[in-house]
Image (cartoon, rainbow, N blue to C red):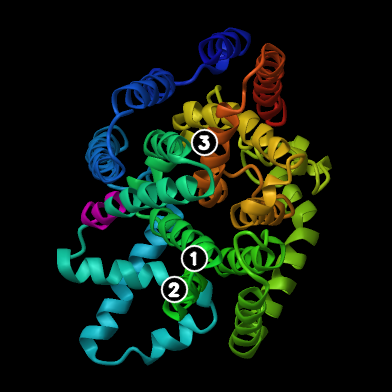
Amino acid sequence: MYLIALVATSLLFFDHLMTWYWIIIGIVEVWLFYYLAVQWEVGWKNRLSRSIESSLFGVTLIVRFLWIFGYYLFTTSVWQTPWEQPIGTAMDSVGYFDEAMWLNEMVKAGDISQYLLYASTRIDDVGYPVFLALCNLISDNSILFTRIPNAFFDAWTVILTYRLAKRNFDESIGRLSAYFVVLMPMVIFYSGTTMKESLMLMLTMWAVERGDFVIREKQYRSWHLVSFAFLAILLTFIRTALAWVIVLAFICALVFTSERIINKSRRVLILFLVVFVGVSFFGGRILEQSESLMEQANSTGANFEYRADRSGGNTLVSGLSKLVFVPFMFALPFPTMVNIEGQNIQQLQNGGYYLKNILSFFCIFALFTLLPKKRWRSNVMIIAFLLGYLMALGLSSFAQSGRFHHPAIPVEMIFAAYGISQIKTIKQAKWFDYFLAVEFFVIIFWNWFKLRGRGLV
């Protein structure tokens, strides 16, 4: 279906055909995802749990290192820049890197008071520059070196996904969801950038996995709760709203998880500790983030108008409601299969966006499968995190941004793997056929919409 959609879009909008290497990369992304996932599912079926973790960690490192060095060679040869985007467009990466060098200069001078004052005004975005500063001290400001740790972050994320899925469902779901995360182009891409996404994804999955473990452990151990709290605190220095969503998901899990998993007395004790510590130490910060999210939701219309008015912007978005993307949050972002100036990354990831669209069917199917059986009470932590994050994202002005969907991808892959395992009748399989037909027309419409809004068709 991907090839059909790609060919149809290319023929319909032939004057705006993507550059040949974006087309090839998209085809390779989709083909390798399906081919390797099937090969591993069959070939690694009889491996033991500990053996499969070693294999997953190793193969993730191989995939990420190939991408990190391969993409670096691509950008330096095609765009003549070490950054992940053409010269002048990698604003966030350059900003993080410059901030890290600025911090190192103050460290060498023996006075970081100015940076501490600056950091106090933007607490939820200082974690990654501090990490980059450490990398720069080791590597003498090597841009390529800052991306090496991303391979290890992603490898650990895959292991966490496997363990979380296995604990919530079974071994087969754990393995399949882990394969998906290893091969998901949207996850692979950010490992080759000087951006915080790989680090943030690892901390997110680690916090969710620890929270789920605390809920399920048979004998309460305080240090497990402390480890969850520590990870949530670390996330506040990278993206505070994300940490807030995880803590709220943990509270939901404490309240709604089945008594077969957590008894009443332990539920009340942990809930009291979480609420007390949260309000005592982070109450003010939570209120600030709540106000920030509400302001962001209310300003989404203005953000659409800005995108319409800026150079190369889409004039059609100015008339959109801030809720227009909410029903599509599981599937977004839609793939860009036409040449749009300044959107190289969207074109590069067209195959990855398509895969996320397709797997969203199984993710939604999984959730609907869990509800009637009341099985959802055994999976509250991951359900609450996924729904909470997508809801917050849907009310923001970044609903169509692949970068902001990144933190939820491993949990979505867990539900997608479970959804695939629940397709057991011809009728259910036909629903997927109908979904593919809808997906085809959505892709055509989306690419027309992007061109039309810029006056290109």
Mark drawn on residue 217? 1
Q: Callout 2 environment at 10 Å: few (<14), some (14 to 19), or many (20+)?
A: some
Q: Element under label 1? A: loop
| Towards the viewer: 402 or 95 | 402
Question: In the rendered image, which residue does mark 3 sit on?
Answer: 343
- Quadrant in the picture for residue 44: top left
Disc 3 residue type? Gln
- What residue is drawn where x is 32% and y is 37%? 79
Mark closest to the chain's N terminus, 1 or 3: 1
Say whether marks 3 and 2 touch (CB < 8 Å).
no
Disc 2 residue type? His
Between marks 1 and 2, how big is the CA–CA gap?
9 Å
- What residue is drawn where x is 56% and y is 42%? 412
Q: Nearer the viewer, mark 1 or mark 3?
A: 1
Mark closest to the chain's N terminus, 1 or 2: 1
Quadrant occupied by the N terminus: top right
Question: In the rendered image, which residue does mark 2 sit on?
Answer: 224
267 with respect to 154 (left or right): right
| Towards the viewer: 451 or 394 | 394
**Where does the magenta region start and end?**
143-151
Mark closest to the chain's N terminus, 3 or 2: 2
Residue 110 is a magenta residue: no
Disc 1 residue type? Glu
Q: Element under label 3? A: loop
User: x, y (%) of residue 452?
Assistant: 71, 25
User: x, y (%) of residue 387?
Assistant: 68, 51
Between marks 3 and 2, how big is the CA–CA gap?
43 Å
| Towards the viewer: 292 or 372 | 372
Say whether marks 1 and 2 touch (CB < 8 Å).
yes
